[in-house]
């Protein structure tokens, strides 16, 4: 080996050593040397199995159910061996479209509430879309130009029967699952701002688990995590932490690490080994992002746009497809919904004085202002009052409440979509005067303007209407989640949730 080659190898080795020496928890040797401490034993193995594989069980049941229903219809309709009479293409399309539809509404997620009215409604909505899509794929794509004599009932019945079965059995299984989860626990590691925020968010979901809190700080031990809340957990020592997924006799579903460093190296090593051993361990940031589907406030820095997994700058093709679909949908909407436009305009005119259309300067993509149009739902001059609309606000007209809940007041924005000011889906376009105020109050608020605003969006379908600054910052975290995870799948999920909100009066 030449002297030059040896020199290069030495330089590379020294560079690698220098990079790792700066790491907060740099470690030599094996992380799996835990000094005899057992970290991969799971005491509550049945509950651990449920937390790890429930989604796969649901998937297997769905595939079997669709297959059995389809085979049953083929047996009823035709004579002969079922495997010879059934079409493998039809079977594949029925399974694929049904499974994807359930995935879009969170039907395979451990934390999704599958007993809720909202879940059942979204299941029905997406099943209607699947019905149309499956028929199109079967009759217009897969067998185009070929003789295909299968009875339509063998396709129609599975598409109707599976959603009904899925809603029913998920409701039954989730009843048992929810009862099981109420006997489980979550362990928060740390007692600072992030720990308190994680605790409040878990409690707001009301899943019923016991929450344990442990901390390294001896001054915090024995105190309540939130001092003025009598139900707040008492902070324990790190010594109380057990990585056998059991604390005080309760199965620990997940461990959430909060705070910025400061933990002993050996403890961090235990965390890493426990993660590899099958424990569900989140950082504060990953818990908010993966479970609650928001961007954690601690991630918001000027370097946020460079972080791993940021899809916006990589989805240029989808951005173009989305713009074309926005134009097509806006044109169809303006034509098909023209009778609704007329009736809504008459209702606004007959129930209050003033113009039918309300226009206002809003902030769009890259902070470019534009004029947005809506059917007027508030009395003339209402914008001079409180900048937030309250529940039971006296400024809302007699028809305005219905227009807002049904989202009919947003219909004129289809014109904005056609012009390119708005997309169908994106962060809410805010009033320019509010944006100036928000950018002074809320750091990195401007990041939400990296994409085109929309008529509906991730924040609108997941969080109530903003009634104060706290609501505004919460909605910002949902908007930024959309910006980071900008994708076709996320847009589909927003569409499904928006239809639910329009049909059942859950609009803002």
Image (cartoon, rainbow, N blue to C red):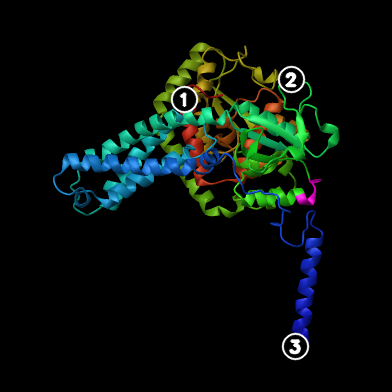
| Side (left or right) of 192 relative to 405 | right
Choose between 228 and 185: the one closer to the eye: 185
First reached walking from the N terminus: tag 1 or tag 3: 3
Find disc 3 in the rendering and name its residue. Answer: 2
Choose between 76 and 36: the one closer to the eye: 36
Q: Position of residue 89 (x, y in %)?
A: 29, 51
Neighbours of disc 1 within 10 Å: few (<14), some (14-19), many (20+): few
Q: Position of residue 17 (x, y in %)?
A: 79, 66
Q: Residue furthest left?
A: 79
| Side (left or right) of 174 relative to 470 | left
Q: Residue furthest bottom?
A: 2
Judged from the image, the secondary structure of the residue bearing numbered disc 3 is: loop
Judged from the image, the secondary structure of the residue bearing numbered disc 1 is: helix
First reached walking from the N terminus: tag 2 or tag 1: 1
Residue 152 seen in the figure: no
C-alpha distance separating marks 3 and 2: 72 Å
First reached walking from the N terminus: tag 3 or tag 2: 3
Q: Residue at x 79, y 81 (%)?
A: 7
Query: Magenta segment, which residues?
Result: 261-266
Find disc 2 in the rendering and name its residue. Answer: 230
Find disc 1 in the rendering and name its residue. Answer: 117
C-alpha distance separating marks 2 and 1: 32 Å
Residue 361 seen in the figure: yes
């Amino acid at each position: 080996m030449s002297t030059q080659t040896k020199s290069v190898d030495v330089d590379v080795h020294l560079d690698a050593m220098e990079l790792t020496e700066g790491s907060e928890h740099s470690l030599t040797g094996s992380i799996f040397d835990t000094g005899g401490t057992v970290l991969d034993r799971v005491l509550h193995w049945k509950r651990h199995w449920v937390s790890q594989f429930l989604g796969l069980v649901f998937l297997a049941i769905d595939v079997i159910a669709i297959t059995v229903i389809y085979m049953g219809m083929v047996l009823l309709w035709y004579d002969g061996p079922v495997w010879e009479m059934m079409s493998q293409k039809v079977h594949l399309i029925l399974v694929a479209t049904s499974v994807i539809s359930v995935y879009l509404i969170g039907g395979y997620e451990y934390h999704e509430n599958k007993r809720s009215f909202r879940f059942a409604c979204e299941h029905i909505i997406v099943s209607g879309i699947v019905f149309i899509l499956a028929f199109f794929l079967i009759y217009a794509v897969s067998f185009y130009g070929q003789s295909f004599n299968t009875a339509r009932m063998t396709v129609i019945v599975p598409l109707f029967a599976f959603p009904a079965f899925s809603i029913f059995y998920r409701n039954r299984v989730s009843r048992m699952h929810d009862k099981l989860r109420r006997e489980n626990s979550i362990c928060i590691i740390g007692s600072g701002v992030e720990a308190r925020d994680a605790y409040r968010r878990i409690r707001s979901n009301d899943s019923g688990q016991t929450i344990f809190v442990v901390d390294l700080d001896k001054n915090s031990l024995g105190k309540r995590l939130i001092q003025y809340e009598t139900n707040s957990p008492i902070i324990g020592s790190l010594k109380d932490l057990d990585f056998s997924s059991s604390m005080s006799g309760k199965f620990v579903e997940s461990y959430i690490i909060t705070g910025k460093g400061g933990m002993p190296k050996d403890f961090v090593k235990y965390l890493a080994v426990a993660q590899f051993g099958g424990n569900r361990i989140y950082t504060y940031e990953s818990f908010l992002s993966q479970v609650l589907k928001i961007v954690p406030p601690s991630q918001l820095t000027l370097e946020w746009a460079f972080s791993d997994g940021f899809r916006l700058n990589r989805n240029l093709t989808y951005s173009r497809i989305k713009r074309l679909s926005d134009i097509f949908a806006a044109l169809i909407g303006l034509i098909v919904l023209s009778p609704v436009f007329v009736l809504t305009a008459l209702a606004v005119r007959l129930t209050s004085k003033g113009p039918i259309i309300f226009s206002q300067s809003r902030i769009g993509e890259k902070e470019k202002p534009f004029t947005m149009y809506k059917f007027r739902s508030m009395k003339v001059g209402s914008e001079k009052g409180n900048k937030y609309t309250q529940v039971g606000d006296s400024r809302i007209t007699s028809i305005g409440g219905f227009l807002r809940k049904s989202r009919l007041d947003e219909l004129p924005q289809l014109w904005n979509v056609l012009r390119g000011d708005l997309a169908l889906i994106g962060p809410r376009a805010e009033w320019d005067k509010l944006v100036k105020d928000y950018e002074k109050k809320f750091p990195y608020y401007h990041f939400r303007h990296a994409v085109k605003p929309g008529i509906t969006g991730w924040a609108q379908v997941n969080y109530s209407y903003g009634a104060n600054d706290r609501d505004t910052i919460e909605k910002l975290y949902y908007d930024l989640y959309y910006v980071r995870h900008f994708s076709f799948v996320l847009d589909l999920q927003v569409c499904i949730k928006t239809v639910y909100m329009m049909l059942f009066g859950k609009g803002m």
